[in-house]
Amino acid sequence: MSSLFETGLEPTEANYATLSPLDFIARTAEVYPDYPAVIHGGIRRDWRETYQRCRRLASALSDRGVGKGDTVAAMLPNIPAMLECHFGVPMLGAVLNALNTRLDAGAIAFMLEHGEARVLIADREYGEVIRKALSRLDNPPLVIDVDDPEYGQGTAISELDYEDFLAGGDPDFIWQMPADEWQAISLNYTSGTTGDPKGVVYHHRGACENAMGNQAVWSMGQHPVYLWTLPMFHCNGWCFPWTITAFAGTHVCLRKVDPEKILQLIADHHVSHMCGAPIVLNTLLGASEAAKSGFSHTVQAMTAGAPPPAKVIEAVEAMGIQVTHVYGLTEVYGPVTVCAWKDQWNDLPVEERAAIKARQGVRYHTLAGLMVGDPESMEAVPKDGRTVGEIFLRGNTVMKGYLKNPEATAEAFRGGWFHTGDLAVWHPDGYVEIKDRLKDIIISGGENISTIEVEDALYRHPGVLEAAVVARPDEKWGETPCAFVTLKPGAQDVTEKDIIDFCRERLAKFKLPRTVVFTELPKTSTGKVQKFVLRDQAREL
């Protein structure tokens, strides 16, 4: 029997519209046309012009036959063209594939072919690697060359210039919202440290919701001034191209992470918000004292990735940069949990506050479900702050799935949850704290050792710049912690004994690193430490 409130009450054009971040720019350009939208070197654009440029891009792509379901790849740094791609491409119903600018030719060729890119918009800085990638393809895409005036180097990748291409488009191009919010809006590839990278597909609804989730958890308000320290190619910049646009903010572009430049831009443009991995925050600590004292306002910084060491959080906040810790993955549009702050924590000692802030926290308003559970039984673990389980997520901000990979998609969604592969505990207050990756946990003499806990202790050593811990085979204990450490300049006299003695004061005996290797840490193109490489090295020691 039908419900009283369902009979005859159907969705119509009057009471139902699909969710998409595309409407954000239309509203902002209508309400705040003269407000600043983009700052890039000497370039200043308002929202009227930025919207027109996005429509020109959509129009020009349409003239080249690009339409619904087609893939448009972009190999661009954090420049205005990349922001324009986040709106101009999906205005056609096409799918944006933002490529990692640190990848080699083989990986780029794989992604262009796997994603069936019709068009590639590429900056001249990457001309050489793009040419090598295209030479591997039987059916290469149409290439559009971007000559960024802030770079002024490199050689043209194509005779088709981006600015000329836009000039041929219609600034009043009439575009359509997607008829179905489940329609794909972007394609992002995982790092692929083992095997081929997987293509993660986002939809309009998820992009819209996570963009709003960013605002909700960060209380950004109207007209934020956002500095692009986070790559826009990474999970579509954690959906911030859409968030900042929705609230008529200003996008301050930055081609390359440079601590002195970051601090200068913060001072010059009164930057209010920025995002990045903990390594970005760490680099700021090495900037000159003049640069660090060049601004007096508080800057909000959102960080994710490996949990930032408490020592880093302490030092950065002493500079006037307030840290918010979030957690997410490529498969969930970037961050979906946040260490939501509580007033009673303000009175705790600095070190305790930083330790709490390093937790991954609670779910975004826009994430339907978060659970720490047993990977096999799928039963929730107790909220005791001790029992380790895997983090599971569900909701609209979980990917559609992996492109052309139904087996991996089915495995990722087994049991009605997305399996993150991250191990965590659930605290009594409901806050999640990651202890390790499922594949990284060290089991020594039957005891579980969190590599993250050991790394946090290592980062507290004044001579340590970077640290990573992996398991090393041991005849007696099965596995013991092996620490790989990069020392700060001027700390080259630090010894293995110094490191172990330092950790002895902060860790239980069974958790101490038995081996310390001083070296540069191997990393993926997205800056993640390649622990599988370190594990191989540890086995050979």
Image (spheres, helix red, strand yellow):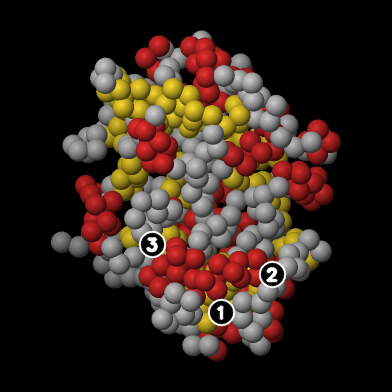
Mark nearest the camera among 3 and 1 is 1
Quadrant location, the C terminus: top left
Quarter of the picture holding the N terminus: bottom left
Q: Is residue 296 visible to us here?
A: no
- Above-or-below relation of 268 to 307: below
Q: Secondary structure at mark 3?
A: strand
Q: Relative to 416, is 289 on the left or the right?
A: right
Which comes before the other along the chain, label 2 or label 1? 1
User: Which residue corresponds to mark 2?
Assistant: 154
Q: Would you say the residues marked 2 and 3 are in contact, meaning their CB atoms lie under 8 Å apart?
A: no
Q: Which mark is residue 143?
A: 1
- Residues at marks 3 and 1, CA–CA distance in whole angstroms: 21 Å
Residue occupying the point 66% across, 81% down: 161
Mark closest to the chain's N terminus, 2 or 3 = 2
Amino acid type, label 2: Gly
Identify the image quadrant of residue 482. top left
- On the image, the x and y values in percent for residue 532 come to 38, 41
How packed is label 2: few (under 14 Cα within 10 Å), some, or many (20 or more)? few
The three-letter code of the residue at mark 1 reads Val
Which residue is painted at 75% across and 37% down in the image? Answer: 287
User: How far from the left and from the top, in percent, is residue 166?
Assistant: 66, 81
As helix, strand or loop, the secondary structure at mark 1 comes to strand
Q: Is residue 479 visible?
A: yes
Q: How many marks?
A: 3
Measured in 3D between alpha carbons, the distance from the residue under mark 2 to the one under mark 3, in whole angstroms, is 29 Å
Q: 513 or 301: nearer the eye?
A: 513
Crowd around label 3: few <14 · some 14–19 · many ≥20 (10 Å): many
